[in-house]
Amino acid sequence: MFEGLFQPMHLLLIFGIALLVFGPKKLPELGKGIGDGIRGFKSAMAMKDEPEASDLEASAKERVE
């Protein structure tokens, strides 16, 4: 169904439309903002997966006792 959706000609067309809509000065700023958002999301997800310091201290105390 989605086979061949993003062929090089399609990507050039999308880039051309974005260039017309946002202009050549705003396009790099838009890309930077999207990149910062993705980086922030990834770091937040990484923090979520790491155990908190209080959890580590509690588990260490349980092992000692």
Image (cartoon, rainbow, N blue to C red):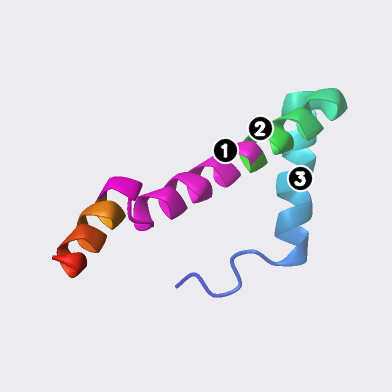
Nearest-to-viewer mark from 3 and 2: 2
For badge 3, the amino acid type reads Phe
Tell me: residue 45, above or below residue 34.
below
For badge 2, the amino acid type reads Gly
- Residue assigned mark 3: 15
Q: Quadrant of the C terminus?
A: bottom left
Region in magenta: 36-54
Measured Cα–Cα span from mark 3 to mark 1: 20 Å
Nearest-to-viewer mark from 3 and 1: 1
Q: Residue furthest right?
A: 24
* Residue at horizontal 20 percent and vertical 66 percent from the top: 64
Labels 2 & 1 near each other (Cβ < 8 A): yes
Measured Cα–Cα span from mark 3 to mark 2: 17 Å
Q: Looking at the picture, tell me which residue is in the foreground, 47 or 51.
A: 51
Measured from the top left, where is residue 15 in percent x and y?
A: 76, 45
Label 2 SS:
helix
